Image (spheres, rainbow, N blue to C red):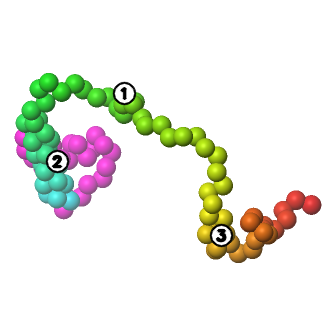
């Protein structure tokens, strides 16, 4: 399928996009490339493959839910402008 300049202008009008006459030719080429790619996808053999509507149908691997401090307090606080022990020090904001 190939789009002509009039169709590109109509698509732009429906999308409420202002397109100058100089841009129509560029958009025409880009839209034709997109439609060409979609035509390529239509040629892919998907026989025997069930549709997948999302990743929710897949089982996720679970990890152990263990509470840790990370063990990298020094690395985390290395760029802190001010610190108090193993904590960030911030200015007092409430009287």
Mark 3 → mark 1, Cα distance in angstroms: 41 Å
Q: Which residue reaches farthest right?
A: 95
Q: In the displayed structure, does residue 58 sit left or right of residue 25?
A: right
Cα–Cα gap, marks 2 and 3? 51 Å
From the image, tell me which residue sits under label 1.
57
Of labels 3 and 1, earlier in sequence is 1
Cβ–Cβ under 8 Å for marks 3 and 1: no
Mark 3, residue position: 74
Residue at which label 2 appears = 34
The residue tagged with tag 1: helix, strand or loop?
helix
Secondary structure, mark 2, is: helix
Q: Nearer the viewer, residue 72 or 76?
A: 72
- Pointer 3 local density, CA inside 10 Å: few below 14, some 14–19, many at least 20: few
* Residue 24, visible in the rendered structure: no
Which region shows up in magenta? 1-22
At 14% across and 24% down in the image, what residue appears?
Answer: 48
């Amino acid at each position: 399928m190939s789009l002509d300049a009039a169709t590109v202008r109509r698509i732009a009008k429906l999308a409420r996009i202002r397109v100058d006459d100089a841009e129509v030719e560029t958009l025409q080429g880009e839209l034709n490339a997109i439609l060409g790619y979609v035509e390529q996808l239509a040629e892919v053999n998907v026989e025997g493959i069930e549709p997948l509507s999302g990743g929710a149908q897949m089982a996720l691997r679970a990890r152990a839910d263990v509470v840790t401090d990370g063990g990298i307090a020094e690395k985390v606080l290395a760029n802190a402008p001010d610190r108090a022990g193993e904590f960030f020090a911030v200015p007092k904001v409430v009287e």
